[in-house]
Amino acid sequence: MTNLLRSPVLWAALLLAAVASTLPWWLSGYVLGVLTVAYYFGVFSMAWDLLFGFAGEVNFGPTFLIGLGAYTAAILDAKWGPPIPVCIIAGGLVALIGGLLLALPALRLRGPYFGLVTLVAVLLLQNCIVIFAGVTGGEIGMTVPDVLSVRAEDNYWYALAFLIVCAIILFGLSRSAIGLILQASGQDAVGAQALGFNVTKHKLAAFCISAVFSGVAGAMLIFYQGTASVSTVVDLGVGVQIIIAAVLGGRRTILGAVLGSVFLIVAGEFLRPLGQINTFVVAAVALAVILFFPDGLLGNLLRVTARERE
Amino acid sequence: MSGTDTPRLQVRGLTKRFGGLLAVKGIGFDIQAGEILGLIGPNGSGKSTVMKLIMGIERPNAGSVKLDGVEMAGWAPHRIARAGVGIVFQHSRPLHRQTVLEHIKLALLPDSLIKLFADPHVERRAREIAERVELGAVMHRHPSSLPFADLRRMEMAKAIARDPKVVLVDEPFAGLNAAESESFAALIRGFRAEGRAVLLVDHNVKSLAALVDRVLAMYLGEHVAEGTAEEVMQDETVRRVYIGGKIETRERPPDEARSKVSILEVQDLSVFYGKARALDTVSMHVREGEFVSVVGLNGAGKTTLFNAISGLLPYQGRIRFGGRDLNGMTGAAVARAGIVQCPETRELFGDMTVRENLDLGGYHLPSGARLPQLTWLFELFPILKSRQGQTARTLSGGEQQMLAIARALMMQPKLLVLDEPTLGLAPVILEQLSKALERLQQTTPITVLLGEQNVTFALPHADRVYVLEHARIVWEGNPARFAKEMGRGYLEAEVADGTSVHPGSE
């Protein structure tokens, strides 16, 4: 506990959260809108980092889980229109079930095969959405009748609050006894088993947790955007962006993933005047960071402070 | 507590097959509570596989492993660990961001998905264990900043934390100096005093002799001898396995090679693996057309020496080949310069055919030179000619070794480096291989550097012999002198510093 209080990451995170909560008073609705999306992406990336950074499994299909949550919530809302929280919880649940069905067989595979299975899962989901276009709106996407709020400030508050809650839970989990066992399972599976830990059980649990957070965040995102479409919540490109954000922010840091997401989304938005070049510039910056600071923004910072203390 | 009649750990008929290779054949033994059993055997004898089979890391094809009478064969490793078996791995793979104390705490945690915070006693217990293994002063440091011996202590601490009934220790003293070895031996004696059953796995009986109650020796997956350390050391089969039985030497025309210049010169070569010293200021040379054997038990540093020469490892000191300093050259550049290594692990392309493997070796040859070279190799190893279309994976161990040598020769090396070619081969295959080497020597003026544990195999071909022991060269001379001076003492490898000889050259 005292270790946690002395952690510079915690204080930096608190400071950033405080700054973020003052933004609605001095930023335009447009900027707040960009940040709102960035915060949901932050949750996607944190959930992904729990799986990659801690459990050591590369999930190339974060959008499989996100898409399940998003489309479940959207379809529920469009068909029956229950209260929004019910739709969001259902989104999380379906993502959990989908994640379990995927991970149970996939975790039996070794090496790159787990990643390949998750990749295929995204393509399958994408195809299903197109095939059942009558319900899902197919490639064009579907309109969600309800939204969280029409005011940019309110949507910003929802996203920020959600981000902070998720960050506390996921960061806390990563620093708990379970996080420790998970890291051991990810970094040296044989060693962890020899210490009596059921590695498959812990990895499966991590996958489920990652699935719930991804699904709920996906559902929240479509209630902000008012539409659900393949290109915003399922496409492989979206998944790649989430992965880049997490790696950019720093593997095994959880909170770094938020920094990476905010950077990617905000930079992408503000470089939009550059036209086609914009994605290229953002990708080039991300590539440079990953090549020269493989530990990511936060990871690199942590290593420097750790070295100074030793 | 078990009764006096049931052993703590009972292993019977343990068998493990990897594809076509029978790695462990019907191994059985008992270990009582408070007893230390040493399991020895040269590399490839299957001793490490036995340890993995007990721990459940590999599943046995047949046989039984009982802990206090309860059958565990086929269980998952975490279940076996929870039943009371602990293992100390030879190489630790510490977590990236955790301190030593956190590593020990990890070992104390229950396998639970809902226990978010460790029980308060965990912290206290972890500190106690850190003190016991002499890590008290560094428990808040990260493993990456610790010396090698402390990393091994941390592995020991993790095993202690599980409070196991049976402890398996892989190569307990590898990479440790004398003082560190002594403190490890004390820890292991502590296990015995606490009534744990201990299995120590090592290459050679000498390092374990002072510690073990009994020794079991393995070779090619089979049980070859059992008894006290002294009995096993005197056992004829064990001596044959390690030394290779009767030592024969064959004098080659003496002055032919001696007048030639050195093609390879190694000066004050040192290599470190992280913090472990694998080679200690080794100096040696090989003359043009000479056949030099480096003999030493496994773990002495032969492979490290060859890998440094082949440009595969960073090193301190100087290696010159044909007058050229090799420092800074990549493995590929060294190979193109003419040093071709045939590694201990063979590194064949298993899914390619024999012919494809050979063609890859000859890839850099001018097209006119390829076919004659291939024809010559098929004369040297006729068996390969008939196996051309077969994939390398399906060859027997001996055939694979011949293919590995042939592929190296395909590159027309100036210096052929053979690392432990006899590893895991049956005696009859050894003879074939030996004949092939003899033909090779007779038909070409090739220079060969051979690393071997099996002295019978290493001596007949050699012009000169180096003995490598504990990362140092302790003896140099011709085979005839080796038979006289080193023969008997080699297994025990007790060459006291005073008696070791370093003649510059004959």
Image (cartoon, rainbow, N blue to C red):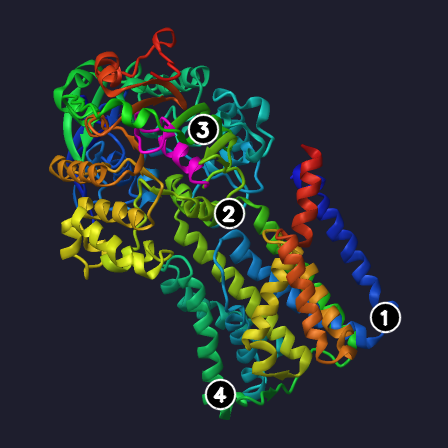
**Residues indicated by labels 1 and 2 sit on the same polypeptide chain:** yes
For residue B266, the mark is 3
Q: Residue furthest right?
A: A26
**Residues indicated by labels 3 and 2 sit on the same polypeptide chain:** no
Q: Which residues are magenta?
A: B286-311
Q: Earlier in the sequence, mark 2 or mark 4?
A: 4
Determine the chain carrying the residue at label 1: A
In this image, A235 relative to A308: left or right? left
Q: Are marks 4 and 1 in contact (CB under 8 Å)?
A: no
Q: Disc 3 marks which amino acid?
A: Val
Return the residue at label 4: A130
Q: Disc 1 marks which amino acid?
A: Leu
Q: Residue at x 24, y 55 (%)?
A: B372
SS at badge 2: helix
For residue A183, the mark is 2
The answer to whether residue B19 of the structure is visible from this angle is no
SS at badge 3: strand
Q: Residues within 10 Å of mark 2 (few under 14, many from 20)?
A: many
Q: Nearer the viewer, mark 3 or mark 1?
A: 3
Q: Are marks 3 and 2 in contact (CB under 8 Å)?
A: no
User: Which is nearer the eye, B145 or B435?
Assistant: B435
Q: Disc 2 marks which amino acid?
A: Gln
Q: Nearer the viewer, mark 3 or mark 2?
A: 3
Q: Residues within 10 Å of mark 3 (few under 14, many from 20)?
A: some
